[in-house]
């Protein structure tokens, strides 16, 4: 019933109610109030997603790229510019990291460019590069340097001070961590550090800086453990030491993130392995786990000081939760789930959808509670980020099932809203990206 009708029926006694209803109606909920200036993403143009199962890279190869997508708060303006930067989807979705001032991006290259005549995944050369890109001008990013890190660098993370980059190296290299100083727009000499107590055969997929800059969290996928090390610096020299106990997570923790306050470290666990049919194609549903991180020693049971980390939370995701993101207030976690969207069209295991899972995180206890899982049309989404408000999520989706989409720009930057009830809603806003988008970072 309209307010004007109420007034005519009941006189001045309801005028105040009518005016209140009218005032409320003048402030409709916005479709979007996305808080973030842009998204930096990288795309692997060498292979189609189905190469993970069939091995065939597919037709229409194109250059790998870094893309900056400028975003208006209402999502009506989504303008992208891309430049060639070698990278690979064959690794964790942590192949791009930004300096704290968000003027420089670093990108690792797990595998190199597809050679002429290359048709299968095995034809791809092992990569070695760490590339630095100046992104201070969002409309004109430019490569400012590239160095050789060693064989098959994977995850990359930038120190909170912005002057030191760390990357993990695949066991094929024989070295584990590579530290690279960064100052005045230039990368310095690489220093390699061996992790104490970790065999060279153990794959460390990612090293993530603690917000304090004093510690690193390392994901050990083979042993399904997270370990922490303290980092000390003497001039240009970097040293690490074990910090507390290793923590056993769920199977195959591929990557992880610290909460903004540094109190907890979360991992997405894929349940992949040699004991899984197809290694990963038929893995059971994955999950997200939460570890309470101890930044200081406390009194142990024997009365001596000890550093003790604890597994404190777990929430169910869906199949292959390869990428996770944490909201700025530390209260929401999202995982992007590959499902089996990447299977060849003739494979009976193919799902014509991917999914996104939302979890509530208790910032005090670290406990996780599953809130929602939403399926959507897309192939191989590997990474997500929250906007600065924590109310919106953006995801890079590697490819599309839609045969009418241009195969060169079949990837997409997709947007989702979190409702007050803790539900995910996919927005009708999307930006095309070069096919193969797989890692991303928010530019505030």
Image (cartoon, grey):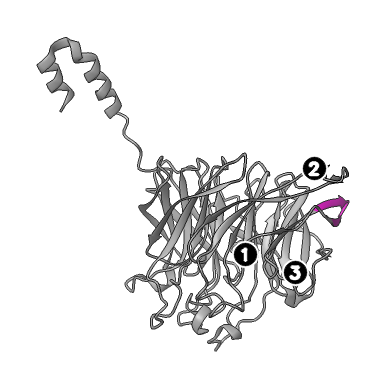
Which numbered disc covers residue 117? none
Can residue 238 be found in the magenta stretch? Answer: yes
* Residue 7 visible, this orientation: yes
Q: Which residues are magenta?
A: 230-240
The furthest residue to the bottom: 117
Is residue 412 found left or right of 279 in the rendered image? Answer: left
Real-space Cα distance between discs 2 and 1?
26 Å
Q: Which element carries disc 2, helix, strand or loop?
A: loop
Q: Quadrant of the C terminus?
A: top right
- Ranked by sequence position, the earlier of labels 3 and 1 is 3
Is residue 303 found left or right of 75 in the rendered image? Answer: right
Q: Quadrant of the N terminus?
A: top left
Q: Position of residue 219 (x, y in %)?
A: 69, 62
In the picture of the structure, the residue carrying the numbered disc 3 is 149
Q: Residue at x 56, y 87 (%)?
A: 118
**Toward the viewer: 198 or 41?**
198
- Of circles 3 and 2, the one toward us is 2
Real-space Cα distance between discs 3 and 2?
33 Å
In the picture of the structure, the residue carrying the numbered disc 1 is 254
The crowd level at tag 1 (other Cα within 10 Å; few <14, some 14-19, many 20+) is many
Q: Position of residue 193 (x, y in %)?
A: 83, 64
Q: Position of residue 398 (x, y in %)?
A: 47, 67
In the picture of the structure, the residue carrying the numbered disc 2 is 296
Residues at discs 2 and 1 in contact (Cβ within 8 Å): no
């Amino acid at each position: 019933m309209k307010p004007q009708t109420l007034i005519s029926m009941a006189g001045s006694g309801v005028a105040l109610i009518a005016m209140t209803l009218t005032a409320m109606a003048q402030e409709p909920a916005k479709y979007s109030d996305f808080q973030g200036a842009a998204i930096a993403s990288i795309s692997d143009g060498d292979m189609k997603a189905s190469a993970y199962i069939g091995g065939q890279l597919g037709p229409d190869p194109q250059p790998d790229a870094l893309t900056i997508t400028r975003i208006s708060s209402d999502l009506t303006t989504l303008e992208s510019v891309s430049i060639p930067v070698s990278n690979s989807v064959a690794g964790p979705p942590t192949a791009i990291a930004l300096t704290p001032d968000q003027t420089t991006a670093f990108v690792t290259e797990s595998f190199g460019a597809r050679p002429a005549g290359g048709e299968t995944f095995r034809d791809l050369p092992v990569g070695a590069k760490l590339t630095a890109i100046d992104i201070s001008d969002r409309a004109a990013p430019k490569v400012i340097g590239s160095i050789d890190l060693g064989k098959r660098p994977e995850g990359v993370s930038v120190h909170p001070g912005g002057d030191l980059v760390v990357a993990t190296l695949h066991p094929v290299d024989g070295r584990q961590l590579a530290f690279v100083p960064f100052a005045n727009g230039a990368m310095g000499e690489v220093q390699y550090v061996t992790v104490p107590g970790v065999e060279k055969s153990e794959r460390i997929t990612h090293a993530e800086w603690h917000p304090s800059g004093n510690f690193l969290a390392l994901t050990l996928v083979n042993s399904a453990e997270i370990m922490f090390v303290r980092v000390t610096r003497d001039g240009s020299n970097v040293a690490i030491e074990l910090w507390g106990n290793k923590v056993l997570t769920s199977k195959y923790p591929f990557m992880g993130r610290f909460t903004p306050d540094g109190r907890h470290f979360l991992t997405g666990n894929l349940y992949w392995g040699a004991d899984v049919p197809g290694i990963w194609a038929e893995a059971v549903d994955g999950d997200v786990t939460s570890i309470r991180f101890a930044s200081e020693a406390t009194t142990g049971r024997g009365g001596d000081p000890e550093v003790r980390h604890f597994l404190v939370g777990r929430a169910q995701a869906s199949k292959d939760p390869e990428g996770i993101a944490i909201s700025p207030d530390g209260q929401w976690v999202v995982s992007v789930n590959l499902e089996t969207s990447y299977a060849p069209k003739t494979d009976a295991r193919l799902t014509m959808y991917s999914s996104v899972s939302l979890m509530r995180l208790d910032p005090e206890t670290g406990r996780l509670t599953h809130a929602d899982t939403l399926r959507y049309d897309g192939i191989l989404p590997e990474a997500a980020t929250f906007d600065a408000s924590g109310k919106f999520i953006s995801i890079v989706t590697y490819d599309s099932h839609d045969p009418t989409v241009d195969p060169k720009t079949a990837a997409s930057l997709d947007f989702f809203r979190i409702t007050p009830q803790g539900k995910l809603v996919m927005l009708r806003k999307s930006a095309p990206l070069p096919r193969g988008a797989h890692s991303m970072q928010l530019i505030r």
